[in-house]
Image (cartoon, rainbow, N blue to C red):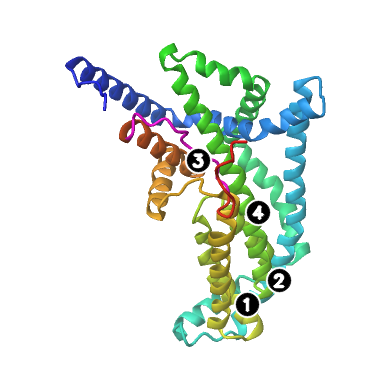
């Protein structure tokens, strides 16, 4: 094996390079609040750029600005349509919850797992809240109308609201400017690299783009399917807030294992379902556990292998560690990009540190297990 000797000059260069990397990392961490809007905008631009390209290349939109605004309009309208669809469901389910809570405060008996004193305290507290009248449809809307002006004055005087609005505007402006010159910006990142390192950096960025593209598209499809299946499962066992709760768990599924945060609200919803029907709390809870287990098996055995392939191939412990580290560094965005970034870092470590003479492609196509990965070469 032909390897370079570790001379004093080489060691010094390696230490300087390591110091530069540490300095860049500390600088990014220090400026994370400033860089976060740009990173969010870049992520959105990365996801929306294929749609912009579709309008410009396939539908022959002559002006890229028109393609960008058409894409943004579709994106905003789609988001608004989802809100318009879910809002009546949420109001309807909240109205049902009011009746269940009042029913529980009057009649529900949980002697088997709550002391009598706790039961009395919970009943008295819920009854004094007068939830039934407060959570009816017309009262909800009237309450919103009455509170809206007061909340507006309160929020309008809040510096945090102004800052949050400014961040949204900045992200939107970043998004437009990045989409306008997406190709130039991507190529410009390569031009600032010294020529002797340009090819490897170009390869890294190309692999990063492929990996992120596969991961986000695949994980988004998995999250949508899981959300729909959760909604169906909770509807079958007639759990309150079945559709809203199921879709929420699907959204949380964009980050692996984050859907487990739904365990606590599931326990409370099981309590209300038991109060409504007089059914044993533990039988309702068993139904919820079965839904979670069946959906987890479907996701692990069918959806993830067929849709995601072997995009990550990480051990669950490594996944949790990766989510913790990236989440602490970049918040929610860090948790979203944690797995593809960790996978690429491990792949490059194996290639350039453990196997420096190996020249195969880092990330292979994540084909389903029942399909051949290699082609015939014809």
Q: Residues within 10 Å of mark 1 (few under 14, many from 20)?
A: many
Callout 2: 10 Å neighbours few (<14), some, many (20+)?
some
- Image: magenta residue range: 355-367
Question: Which circle's residue, 2 or 4, is located before the other in the chain?
Answer: 2
**How far across and how far down the image is residue 254, in percent?**
56, 50
Q: Say whether disc 1 or disc 3 marks the residue closer to the N-terminus.
A: 1
Q: Earlier in the sequence, mark 4 or mark 1?
A: 4
Residue at 75% over, 31% down: 54
Residue lying at 75% horizontally and 33% vertically, measured from the top left: 71
Q: Are marks 4 and 1 in contact (CB under 8 Å)?
A: no
Q: Nearer the viewer, residue 18 or 307?
A: 307
Q: Nearer the viewer, mark 4 or mark 1?
A: 4
- Tell me where residue 331 appears, x and y as whole percent: 47, 42
Image location of residue 278, percent across then percent down: 62, 86
Q: Is residue 168 left or right of residue 54?
A: left
Compare marks 4 and 3 and give the one earlier in the sequence. Answer: 4
Give the CA distance from mark 4 to mark 1.
26 Å
Residue placed under numbered mark 1 in the picture:
273
Disc number for residue 224 = 4
Q: Mark 2 sits on what residue?
A: 96
Estimate the spatial distance between the alpha carbons at disc 3 and disc 2, rounded to whole Å. Answer: 38 Å
- Between the C-alphas of marks 4 and 3, the distance is 18 Å
What residue did someone put label 3 on? 337
Q: Do callouts 1 and 2 mark residues in contact (Cβ within 8 Å)?
A: no
Disc 3 versus disc 2: nearer the observer: 3
């Amino acid at each position: 094996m032909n390897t370079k000797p570790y001379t004093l000059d080489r060691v010094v260069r390696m230490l300087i390079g390591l110091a530069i990397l540490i300095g860049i990392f500390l600088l990014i961490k220090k400026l994370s609040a400033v860089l976060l809007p740009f990173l969010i905008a870049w992520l959105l631009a990365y996801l929306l750029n294929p749609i912009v390209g579709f309008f410009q290349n396939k539908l022959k939109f002559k002006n890229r600005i028109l393609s960008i605004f058409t894409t943004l309009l579709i994106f905003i309208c789609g988001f608004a349509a989802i809100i318009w669809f879910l809002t009546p469901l949420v109001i309807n389910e909240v109205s049902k919850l009011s009746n269940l809570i009042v029913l529980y405060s009057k009649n529900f008996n949980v002697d088997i797992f709550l002391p009598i004193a706790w039961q009395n305290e919970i009943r008295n507290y819920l009854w004094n809240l007068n939830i039934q009248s407060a959570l009816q449809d017309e009262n909800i809307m009237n309450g919103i109308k009455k509170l809206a002006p007061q909340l507006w004055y309160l929020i309008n005087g809040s510096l945090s609201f102004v800052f949050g609005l400014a961040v949204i505007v900045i992200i939107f402006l970043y998004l437009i400017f990045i989409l306008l010159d997406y190709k130039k910006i991507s190529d410009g990142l390569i031009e600032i690299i010294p020529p002797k390192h340009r090819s490897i950096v170009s390869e890294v960025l190309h692999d990063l783009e492929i990996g992120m593209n596969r991961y986000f598209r695949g994980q988004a499809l998995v999250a949508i399917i899981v959300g729909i299946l959760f909604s169906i499962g909770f509807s079958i066992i007639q759990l309150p807030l079945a559709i809203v709760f199921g879709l929420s768990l699907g959204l949380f599924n964009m980050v692996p294992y984050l859907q487990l945060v739904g365990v606590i609200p599931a326990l409370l919803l099981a309590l209300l379902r038991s109060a409504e029907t007089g059914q044993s709390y533990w039988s309702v809870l068993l139904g919820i556990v079965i839904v979670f287990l069946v959906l987890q098996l479907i996701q692990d055995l069918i959806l993830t292998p067929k849709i995601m392939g072997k995009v990550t191939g990480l051990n669950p412990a490594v996944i949790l560690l990766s989510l913790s580290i990236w989440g602490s560094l970049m918040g929610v965005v860090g948790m979203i990009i944690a797995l593809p970034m960790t996978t690429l870092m491990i792949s490059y470590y194996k290639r350039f540190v453990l196997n420096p003479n190996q020249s195969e492609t880092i990330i292979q196509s994540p084909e389903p297990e029942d399909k051949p990965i290699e082609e015939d070469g014809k």
